[in-house]
Image (cartoon, grey):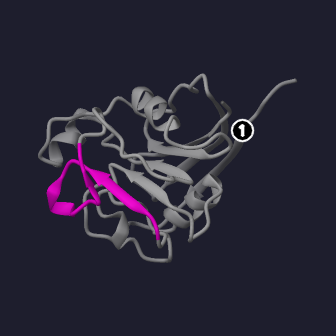
Amino acid sequence: MSYRPICDTWLLARPKVKYYGAYPNGFLQRARTLLGCSHLDAVLHVCGGKAREYPNNGFGMYDKTIDLNPDVEPDFLMDVTKEIPMGEWKGILIDPPYTLEDASKYGKHSFPEPNALLKKCMNFVEVGRCVGMLHYVVPAVPKNAKEIALIAVIMGNNNRIRCFSVFRRTE
């Protein structure tokens, strides 16, 4: 039997949060749905930046952020290439710097490699739960996961297209 993930294209508005790399407006609530998370489920925002300032009911009541930049006041100030906080995460949303140039804009020299970061995060959700990544790279499917969605994310003309990839933990 062949397998095909959900495929779609989201044409979204520019971010309403004044922060380099902020989520496009309309992204976060759609992403939560694909992760299978309600507003009451705890989602970990890896490389979360200013996700908690996102409008439109996208940031949940029990969501937490992890970031290397103390200026964004994350719940967990740590380097995701070294550790991920334990928790009862119903979903994980990863939005790392996409390039070394992007990483330099945040003032730190850590660049999380997408495949390694996804593989690490898959171990912090229960079987049946999802991890999503917004990136230029469509990461490889980890051995303990199944790819369930690939969404092109566009913010109009003269912007790079990104991909939101969602993976469900299988073991």
**How many residues crowd mark 1 within 10 Å: few (<14), some (14–19), many (20+)?**
some
Q: Which residue is more in the foreground, 140 or 90?
A: 90
Where residue 46 appears, as percent x and y from the top left, is: 37, 48
Name of the residue lying farthest toward the left: 107
Where residue 101 appears, as percent x and y from the top left, is: 20, 37
Q: Quadrant of the N terminus?
A: top right
Name of the residue lying farthest toward the bottom: 56
The magenta region covers 62-78
Q: Which residue is more in the foreground, 33 or 162?
A: 33
Q: Quadrant of the C terminus?
A: top right
Where residue 141 appears, as percent x and y from the top left, is: 58, 27
On screen, residue 156 versus residue 66, left or right, reads right
Q: Name the residue under label 1.
A: 5
Q: Is mark 1 on a helix, strand or loop?
A: loop
Q: In this view, does 41 lie above or below 21?
A: below
On screen, residue 167 versus residue 160, left or right, reads right
On screen, residue 6 versus residue 167, left or right, reads right
Residue at (63% x, 46% y) in the render: 129
Please give the count of numbered marks on the rendered protein.
1
Query: In which quadrant of the rendered view does residue 120 lie?
Result: top left
Question: What's the amino acid at mark 1?
Answer: Pro
Where residue 161 appears, as percent x and y from the top left, is: 46, 46
Residue at (46% x, 38% y) in the render: 121
Residue at (31% x, 52% y) in the render: 66
Residue 73 belongs to the span the image colors magenta: yes
Q: Is residue 45 above or below residue 99?
A: below
Q: Which residue is more in the foreground, 91 or 163?
A: 91
Residue 149 belongs to the span the image colors magenta: no
